Image (spheres, rainbow, N blue to C red):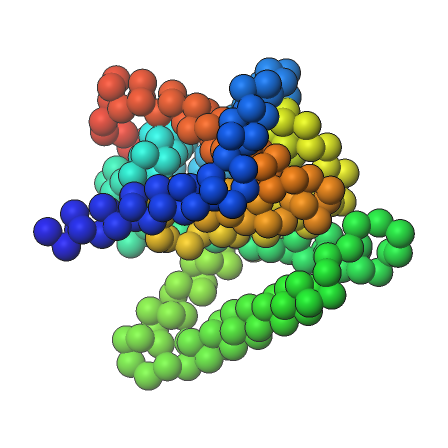
Amino acid sequence: MGRVLSVGLQFAVAIGLLVLLWQVADGQSAVDHLVNAELAWLLAALVAVTGQLVLSALRWQLTAAQLGLVLTKQQAVREYYLSQVVNQLLPGGVLGDVGRAVRARAQAGLVISGQAVLFERLVGQVALVLLFGAAVFGTWAVPGGFDLPASLQFSVFVTLAAAILIATGAAIAGPSLPGKMGTAFANFIANLWRAVCAREVRHRQVLLSIGTVVLNIAAFACCAAAVGVMLAPATAMVLVPLILFTMLIPITVSGWGLREGATAMLLPLAGATAAEGFAASVAFGLVVLFSALPGVVVAALSTVTKPVRP
């Protein structure tokens, strides 16, 4: 019953936020922008999202292999599609990833398969944060381009600094904890290093992660262009990550409502209207949902991934 209430609440929050945005961001105008959206830009966004998904699957395959979990490229892509469609259709945004770890546990156990999924997602978020930080610093250091408001710049720099300090402190202090907790933390850090930072994989991890982040930002920029908002690359590198970060807050279904609210607030900094921001975000959400639909076919054809024996 508690789970049902939680799911219902997430749907209710998403719907409530969208209804509120309809009132304050001129929902009818947003619909007009969507109806008249340029198909070529939407198709470009679909290609970018699909490319991002494939690169993410390859990153998972690489990460898992470092932990002793062997997947073929076809398995990795197929499982990623399946996890994405679950993440898009169900509240929480992580149930598909949990299922991916469970289905891949046969070779190395649930802990290792879970770490492979966690590390892959973590690397993607870290890459997004680093690219965002570099873009914000670049726009701050080079005058004449896009600049965030001073108050928002301060909040961004403080948040990034705090995240770096917390992560560094945890990595240093965690293995020193007494007993099994310290041992488990040390093993976690060792596996993370081996999966992501080992010499034989670090360059591929960097390239795959940069590729996924750039394609994700490009997909959103294409959706904005489809409704008439042309974002310069530097502007997209700053604003789109801020919008995507809101999707990590697990109070709605796949970030719906939160993402639209953030876009309606942030895109006006680039000269758009709130209605255009609302429309761009809805277009992006629909493109992401459509890109995940092959996962429905995967689910229909096969519900269990057979492990590849090393």
Image location (x, y in percent) of residue 88: 37, 35
**Which residue is pictured at 68% across the width and 58% down the height?**
133
Q: Nearer the viewer, residue 150 or 43?
A: 150
Asked which quadrant contains residue 102, the reply is: top left
From the viewer's perspective, is 18 left or right of 104?
Answer: right
**Which residue is pictured at 63% across the width and 68% down the height?**
155
Image location (x, y in percent) of residue 278: 54, 38
Circle count: 0
Q: Nearer the viewer, residue 270 or 125?
A: 270
Position of 59 relative to 44 (above/below)? below
Query: Residue 116: in sight, yes or no?
Result: no
**Which residue is pictured at 73% across the width and 60% down the height?**
149
From the viewer's perspective, is 74 left or right of 225?
Answer: left
Asked which quadrant contains residue 84, the reply is: top left
Position of 122 relative to 52 (above/below)? below
Query: Residue 232: in sight, yes or no?
Result: yes
Figure quadrant of the C terminus = top left
**Which residue is pictured at 59% across the width and 68% down the height?**
159
Image location (x, y in percent) of residue 217: 62, 39
Asked which quadrant contains residue 138, the reply is: bottom right
From the viewer's perspective, is 39 left or right of 150?
Answer: left
Image location (x, y in percent) of residue 196: 52, 52
From the viewer's perspective, is 306 left or right of 122?
Answer: left
Q: Nearer the viewer, residue 223 or 79?
A: 223
Position of 119 relative to 22 (above/below)? below
